[in-house]
Image (spheres, rainbow, N blue to C red):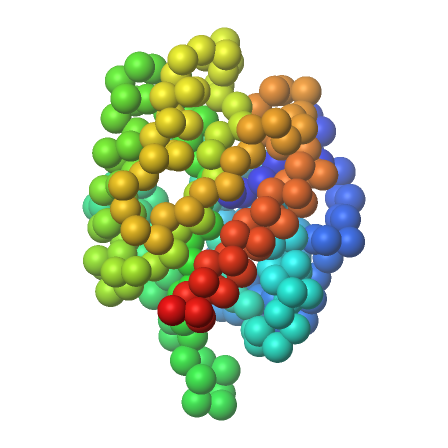
Amino acid sequence: MAGHGGLINGTWDGVVSPESRPNPNILKLNPMLQWEEAEEPLHAGIDPGPNGIGPGMPFANLLLQKIPNYGIIGLVPCAVSGTSIILWQKGTILYNQLMDRAMAALQNGDGNGNENVIEALLWYQGESDTTTLIDAKAYKARLQQFIMDLRTDLNLPDLLVLQVALASGLGKISKSQYVERVREAQLNIELPNVKYVDAMGLPLQPDNIHLTTSAQVRLGNMLSHEFTAHQNSFADV
């Protein structure tokens, strides 16, 4: 979910839409594992690739609009662009980094006796798994294992996972059956509390892979709506 909105030849154009603007009630865990006011690009210093607008800030801003008394939102960016799901399996560098950042985010509450709580994992990944049939076929099992391991290691067996169904794939494979195989896996995860929003049809940049800035904003809004719908259904139980 690093986001490439607004990237032109690998350089961010610096344009921040109203939906992505900073808010003192939206923090991010920076590369030094310290909280600071969040701003775009959210993954700067975390994802080594070029970074632009992603869905994280629109997600958080809309959430605060929908639930004004929600409190402080802490975003914990962990994404690394261009990585396949096998690189996120338990024991890998990326998995360990994610766990380190998640555990750091749980430390040091707000000073008023309120502890930090991980409410959800926002997951947008899979384009790199559309290049071979082997990876596409294995995607569902690998993603499910990743989710199960993460929930176990965080001691959050019911952690909400909001995943994004792919809008594209890589290269010529983007029009092949491999994208559909990965999408089918994403739409049919056989685990509780795993929801999805579908990015298919959102505007793409000229590379036909990454979402435009406006599409990233729409995606963030979709994720926020799904999150609040889950919160409301949970409250009704």
Q: Is residue 118 left or right of residue 156?
A: right
Foreground residue, 135 or 144? 144
**Would residue 101 appear left or right of 38 to someone viewing this image?**
left
Asked where in the image residue 139 lies, by quadrant, the reply is top left
In the image shown, does 140 or 73 lie closer to the viewer? Answer: 140
Which residue sits at x=67%, y=45%? 217
x 49%, y 87%: residue = 111
Q: Residue 12: name its quadrant.
A: top right
Q: Position of residue 164 (x, y in %)?
A: 48, 39
Residue 117 at what x, y percent from top left?
A: 41, 71
- Residue found at x 42% / y 58%: 120
Residue for point 43% across, 89% down: 113
Q: Nearer the viewer, residue 165 or 80?
A: 165
Give the percent coordinates (x, y) of residue 42.
59, 52
- Residue 145 in the image: above or below residue 73: above
Q: How many marks?
A: 0
Q: Is residue 210 above or below residue 112?
A: above
Residue 81 visible in this rendered orientation of the protein:
no
Relative to 177, say whether 30 is above or below.
Answer: below
Q: Position of residue 126 (x, y in %)?
A: 41, 31
Q: Is residue 136 visible?
A: yes
